[in-house]
Image (tube, rainbow, N blue to C red):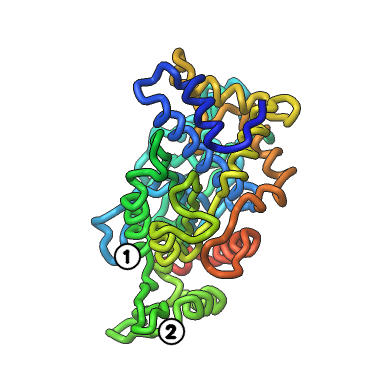
Amino acid sequence: MAYKSIEAVQEALTNGIFSKRKDARKAAGRSLGTLVEIITFYLLRSYGLEDYLAIERSLKEYARPEIGHNVEFTLHGSSLLGTVPYGQEDSISAAKIAKSLGIVTDGYERKSHKPVANRLVKNAATLFESEHSFINAYPCAAEKAIRVSKLTIRPFAMLECKRVGVEKGLSRGPQTIEKAKQGAYVALTASRLQKVRALDGRLFGILEEGAGEFTIKPYSDLLYSIIKGRDYRRLRDVVVTVGVVSNHGNWFTHENQNKEMKVLSESYDWLLFLTDEGLTSFINDMLLGEAAHLTATYRAFQRCYADDASNNDKFTKSSMPMLADIELTKYFSDNLERITGWFNIVAPAGGTVPYLMELLRDLAHIDWAEVYKQ
């Protein structure tokens, strides 16, 4: 059956897949949060940004590298090292990939991640890491190939997803303001380009140019002048911050923004609002199974949360069954215009998802290895 709202979806999951859990409603809500992350990942893939992507890496605060915060996605300067084919039954290790491509890994620490194993793909799997760069694998189930790239340690953009469910009988999630403050703090400390507020409320950016000299201009003007100017000296350590939030009564109403949404929109450079209607549309399509060409996807979702689920039953932004990955990649490619319509842009005013993705692609094409050349 199709659902008319996220509330109906959460109730169905609470009374169905999660009915035996200690806190079934909370478990159902967490699964919806996972879906927001999955939607964000496949959106980035559809716009050609996957090869610049890292998942769940520690984002270091600007000028305070001893403090890091795990975020869902970061985008880094990237250079392709090669492509390795694989079969459905293969299990491919970092050592096998390095040998196949002739990658010199002296000075790198080898990670345990396998980009392909047990008919699962591990998205943006980190194979090796050093002080200045890391090597990621990007498996493509549809092509049965793994692209391997070297990325700069410091990102040029970050994306963080935020969703807080509502407990039964309450109008809003009790942790909503805490979640908003957490996201705001990370966004405000990530970039060399800092935000300051004038007496009249206007938002300015301040950029240290070196030797104690600073440039202060309206924030958006300064940010985009740095990006468009392609000045490597000024681009260094500038991080574009993107928040993705879903609603469910917490962040936003049609009548007005809640305090939490204002906190987030003032902190992130871009704030995307995934509507309840959009998330419900995705879930309804997934429930249609074969009719929407998402049979393996729905099966993977069910298996991931089944009582007898094993370690091989995955359905996350990081690990996905091969067949579900193929379906989702095609689904997002075929429905990209409709999917971008699931998002409202809270900040900046007048922004659109395609423009944001174009901006991120422009940043991706900068020679970041040269920007961070030691």
Q: What residue is drawn where x is 67% and y is 43%? A: 332
Q: Looking at the figure, which quarter contains the N terminus?
A: top right
**Mark 2 element type:** strand
Specify the quadrant of the image occupied by residue 64: bottom left
Q: Could you say where residue 131 lies in the image, as x and y percent from the top left?
A: 33, 54
Estimate the x, y position of residue 156 in percent, counting from the top left: 46, 62
Residue 141: tell me if it is visible: no
- Separation of residues labelled 1 and 2 (CA atoms): 20 Å
Callout 2, which amino acid? Answer: Lys
Most extreme residue toward the top is 308
The image shows residue 163 at horizontal and vertical percentages of 44, 45
* Residue 263 visible in image: yes
Which is nearer the eye, 241 or 22?
22
Q: Indicate the quadrant containing the C terminus: top left, top right, bottom left or bottom right.
A: bottom left
Above or below 199: residue 8: above
Mark drawn on residue 153: none
Q: Residue shown at 53%/20% (left/top)?
A: 303
The answer to whether mark 1 and mark 2 are in CB contact below 8 A is no
Q: Which residue is mark 2?
A: 217
- Crowd rating for badge 1 (residues with CA inside 10 Å; few <14, some 14–19, many 20+): many
Residue 62 disc label? 1
Picture layout, residue 248 above or below residue 217: above
